[in-house]
Amino acid sequence: MKTVEAPGPYEFSLGELYAALDAQRRTRRLSWAQATREINRQSERVSVHPLSPSTITGLRTKAVAEGDGVLQMLLWLNRTPESSVPGYQASEGVDARLPEVPPHKILRFDTRKLHAALDAQRMGRKMTWAQVAKEVGVSVSSFTRLSKGGRTGFPHLMRTVRWLGRPAAQFTRLSDW
């Protein structure tokens, strides 16, 4: 089995997220299939791209995970994205909590809003995109994807919001699909 390096300090930990999911699943005596159905909220909505049990159990060894899927897992756990960053002392204020998601909606990252916030801070600090990418620890192309409304992943997203000094929840939106 492939092993992944332990995350650095203040790095979002997919392994920790997996452990929290597994602990919740075991406490509730659910199979991975049952837990996945709940995470997908299949009783409330038809999921266009539902998570699979293997996607969730694969968090043990993955270095990167798709952001919108991680949001669904965090909602199921009733946790903030910052809660899986070891040593990070995040605000538990209203702005840090993920919003309530009504039936037939799904929570997604608002990557255009995230890009706009990055661009504003970049211009305010008189930096190039290459300089921002180096400080954040991601590629410049990841910012291009954000500007086009593309998907993002963990831990990259958490590096980005940490650079902005804002909670990840501020960059979410409700969607019909």
Image (cartoon, rainbow, N blue to C red):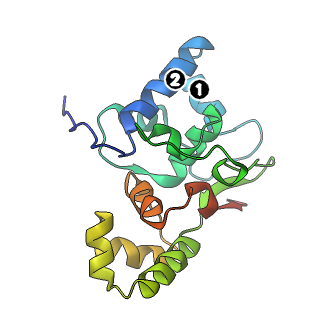
Point 31% across, 43% down: residue: 9
Point 36% across, 45% down: residue: 10
- Residue behind mark 2: 32
Q: Is residue 43 above or below residue 169?
A: above
Q: Report x, y in % for residue 28.
A: 63, 14
- Tell how many labels: 2
- Residue behind mark 1: 35
> Along the horizontal axis of the image, is 5 left or right of 27?
left
Most extreme residue toward the right, as rendered?
Answer: 102
**Can residue 31 be spotted in the picture?**
no
Q: Report x, y in % for residue 93.
A: 69, 47
* Relative depth, front residue between 84 and 62: 84
Q: Residues within 10 Å of mark 2 (few under 14, many from 20)?
A: some
Question: Which residue type carries mark 2?
Answer: Trp
Q: Is residue 161 above or below residue 4?
A: below
Q: Secondary structure at mark 2?
A: helix
Q: Secondary structure at mark 1?
A: helix
> Along the horizontal axis of the image, is 80 left or right of 154?
right
The answer to whether marks 1 and 2 mark residues whose Cβ atoms lie closer than 8 Å is yes
* Relative depth, front residue between 34 and 138: 138
**Can residue 156 be spotted in the picture?**
yes
Question: Which residue type carries mark 1?
Answer: Ala
- Quarter holding the N terminus is top left
